[in-house]
Image: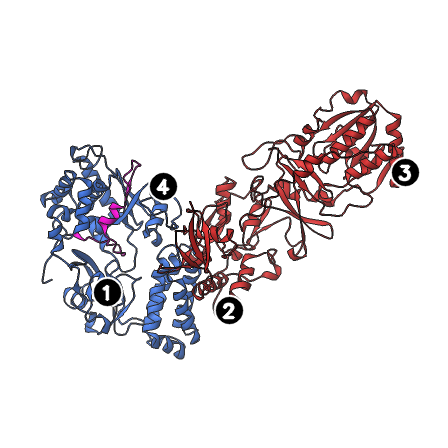
Amino acid sequence: MSIKIKINGREIECEPGKTILQVALSSGIYIPHFCYHPRLSIKGSCRMCLVWIEKRPKLEIACNTVVADGMVIETDNEEVRKARRAVLEFNLKNHPIDCPICDKAGECTLQDFYMAYDAEPSRLSPRDQKVKKGKRIPMGPTLVLDQERCVMCHRCIRFMREIAKNDCITDARRGDRTIITTFPGEVVDDPYSMNLIDICPVGAWTGRDFRFKKRVWLLSKCPSICPFCARGCNIFIEHEKDIVYRITPRVNEQVNKSWLCDEGRLAYKALNENRLTRALLRNGKELKEVSMGSALSYGAKLLNEHQGKILGIVSASASLEEAELFKKLIQSAGGELAIHRRKEGKDDFLLRRADRDSNLRGLKQLGIDRAVGEAIVKAELVVVLESLYSEPVSSELGKKMIVLSPRRSEMVESALLSLPIGAYAEIEGTFVNCDGISQRFYPGLQLKGDAKAGVDMIRFLGKKMGIDLQLSMESARSADACVAPVSESE
Amino acid sequence: MSEEIKILTVNWDKPNSQSIETYLAGGGYKAAEKALGMAPEKVAQEVLDAGLRGRGGAGFPAGRKWMFMPKDNRPKYLCVNADEGEPGTFKDREIMRRDPHMLIEGIIIACWAMAANNAYIYIRGEFESEARILENAIEEAYQRGFLGERVFGKDFKLNVWVHRGAGAYICGEETSLIESLEGKRGNPRIRPPFPPQRGVFDMPTTVNNVETIASVPFIIREGKDAYRKFGTEKSPGTKLFSISGHINKPGVYELPLGYPLMKLINEVAGGVINGLKLKAVIPGGSSTPVLRAEECENVNLDYESLASAGSMLGSGAVIVMAEGTCMVKALEILTHFYAHESCGQCTPCREGTGWASQIARRIHNGDAEMKDIDVLYSIGENMLGRTICPLADAAACPIMNFTRKFRDEFEAHIRNKGCPNGRPFPVEFK
């Protein structure tokens, strides 16, 4: 059963029980709002989403007014515009207007709304004082709070209470002296704390890590999948000239909703630091840079020489495509396969999984599920396919070892031959997450130095051995699942 | 007083009026016993038919409010709003201080009508002695079996608690009262859901003013027609008026609704102090629009007459201002109050009250320009009707009315670069 309402003269069919704001947003009609967030309870206090409704004595908030059949709504008449201008003027009354030094500038809702709906000169008299509140207050390991920039939308309070289940922040004092603060003696020390930076519509919550590093309008955003655990959260990698500055969540209803854990966010640093950019060959105790051509030839020679006595070790965070080709390469050289996993963490109630590899389920689909174990003792040559966050298989292997890695890892340091491959952000591939959802990702950053995508590197090795390795992954390719559209504006 | 009407004030002047013996001697708790013999719906109907309207300020029919309570088997609550904080209002305090049992009897009747087994009296923190009086009276009622597991020996359980507030004006607003009662910060809730759907502890709840509840025993004992003998057709019954300011006999008076305002000022309350001329009256507590002296002439103290005069009956707190009162100072005091008491969640109220208070102070101190008056007025305009609770409306009313009705005084302050009166009030109170 559906009902009909009219917004700005347009007839819209909608489900009963929805609010005006929900219906409007899903019909492409934007109503500005600060405090409403689709995943948090309704607060209704920012008063930005006031709309005109026929036969109502005054403007009503769209976020808490349920649609009724035949309702006639105006979201942009003079009365509504005037009310919005008033709300913006009020919000700016005690706001420091320090956009030039604010990290949020460029993605700040208050800034955008002022430009879109107000843009009037200030009526504040030079004689009027702004209320002074706390500036740059350290709020735990990841956050800094500026109470003067706050518009009191209470999103942070509701996020911590309702989503992170860590009720540590509150509003204190009253009137225009109201502030956001922690309960006495508490700090915001939570694995999900950095979501406050995203949901804060203004620059009140900023991240310690990102503060003053980069103006946001200089950053390019590329969609990707977080490889830090088996959840496979959808992310944006935000970079300028291939240097990554931050990772932010990308909405996906089925996977991570709107959230991301702090660990996953801060893991971006590995994309910038300590990368393997050249092929390295051991010469006694030293590692020497060699050309890709000679490295590949030497690799192929090693593989041919040790036919039947090879162990291939795949990181459980390798993409499906890399793993499949690697499996074919090793099997064609008569070797055996094992899987290498990162140390387990702990499952939590929201996103983080104990399994800290991004593609364990994918590898199991390929039949790669044996742990390294005793197999390594028999092997003469060990070939390791690493990923960005791989941990060392073992510190003292004492074996001949070829390592394909995006990072100058401990394994690279003890390898005979190392080949540089792209990290997840630089390649195309598929991860299957803990719930069996295949998620495809595409290159967002350039490959570093001589590095090749893992699949290409393996194919080249094969070619040098005289084998033509082909992917048979039609199923995975068609499973471009789950890159769900951003369903609701936040 | 010429015509003595005593419904709410009947026991006030008796010796030892707080004790249950005094109350019983005057026929007390007969109404509660009678109500428990009636069907609950009939009790609510009787109160509705008597035309009793909420005495806290909004004037919503009490019986109707009770009928909104759902008929399911969730626990239900009555909250008696004794957080009397509206500037100028001090009527509920007198009821609780001088006749607490009338309130308790009213609670029993109201709870029976709504099938509520628990009642809270949310009393403002400053009323410490009143809270003690109430606790004492509740104890007496328990001992007599009027409260407890079997009220009047019937199969009806009722517990009453006194809950003391912590000093916030906003907690007199029903939903923030509920929040505060739950132990949270007193921020008003958005409606819907309304308290009868989800109130205290998310259960159906009715919030009534002390005076409303205290009026109930008379209605049940004497019947709706006896109550309707007083007051007007649309505003029946009597009401307590607390009159204060530049008046000879400030205090609380029980008068029938529809009583002429000027008669209250000149006869009942003994006229304006020192024989001064009347300048203005705030008729229903600080949040109701101010009336100039000439506007008061034919106004009667009932919901309709005051509404047509452009003001409101409110809580019946008449604030009298004599000739010589500086209206800019008066507004400064009022805006400061609202800026201090705004809970700070809704944008217009949080920022508007503080801004208005700043401007009013600047005008009074002579640190302002002419355009500040228009900014001040527009702040009121931009706050009115735009927030979760009516505190912003309450703050906007005086801002808009004072600047409109006494604009010349505001301009004089700005031209004069300070208060032209020398002293803001014709009478200093110690």
Q: Which mark is residue B306?
A: 1
Picture coordinates of residue A332, whole percent (x, y): 82, 27
- Asked if badge 3 and badge 2 are on a common chain, one would say yes
Q: Does the image show residue B169?
A: yes
Residue type pointed to by label 3: Ser
Tell whether A440 sits left or right of B96.
right
Q: Which mark is residue B202?
A: 4
Residue B75 among magenta residues:
yes
Q: Chain of mark 1?
A: B
Label 4 element class: helix
Q: Chain of mark 3?
A: A
Q: Does the image show residue A318?
A: no
Chain shown blue: that is B
Say few, some or many: other residues with alpha carbon within 10 Å of mark 4 (under 14 / 14 to 19 / 20 or more).
some
Tell me: residue B68, above or below residue A298: below
Residue type pointed to by label 1: Leu
Label 3 element class: helix
Tell whether B252 sits left or right of A15.
left
The residues tagged by marks 4 and 1 sit, at their Cα atoms, a distance apart of 36 Å
Q: Chain of mark 4?
A: B
Q: Which residues are magenta?
A: B50-79
